[in-house]
Image: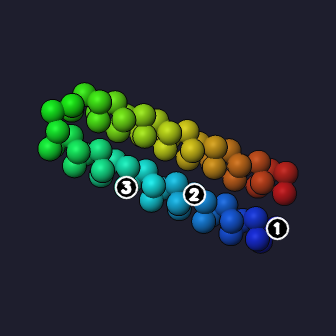
Amino acid sequence: MDTLVELSNVLIWLVRAGVGARIAYCFVKATHNEEIEVYKRRMRNTLIFYILAESVWQLKDIAIYYFG
């Protein structure tokens, strides 16, 4: 069980790092490009993904606490 917990912690940190990198990339591209609306939409979609990913992890933690 400890291996699964460690694996899930690594995975959520990878998601967080990926979201941060994606938002930084979109922000830089939006400042130097004329297609700012495209990058705003991509940043918004990335934030929505992050919120959903964190919600799933919180539900997983609640389920493990409740049933474990």
To which residue does mark 1 refer?
A: 1
The amino acid at mark 3 is Ala
Location of residue 55 with respect to 20 vertically, above or below: above
| Residue at figure coordinates x 22%, y 49% from the top left | 28
Quick one: SS at disc 1?
loop
Q: Farthest right residue?
A: 67
Q: From the viewer's perspective, tell me whether residue 68 is left or right of residue 31.
A: right
Quick one: SS at disc 2?
helix
Q: What distance separates the C-alpha of mark 3 from that of mark 2?
A: 14 Å
Quick one: SS at disc 3?
helix
| Residue at figure coordinates x 63%, y 49% from the top left | 57
- Which mark's residue is nearer the viewer, 3 or 1? 3
To which residue does mark 2 refer?
A: 12
The amino acid at mark 1 is Met
- Asked where in the image residue 4 lies, by quadrant, the reply is bottom right
Q: From the viewer's perspective, tell me whether residue 67 is left or right of residue 22.
A: right
Which tag, 3 or 2, sits closer to the chain's start?
A: 2
To which residue does mark 3 refer?
A: 21
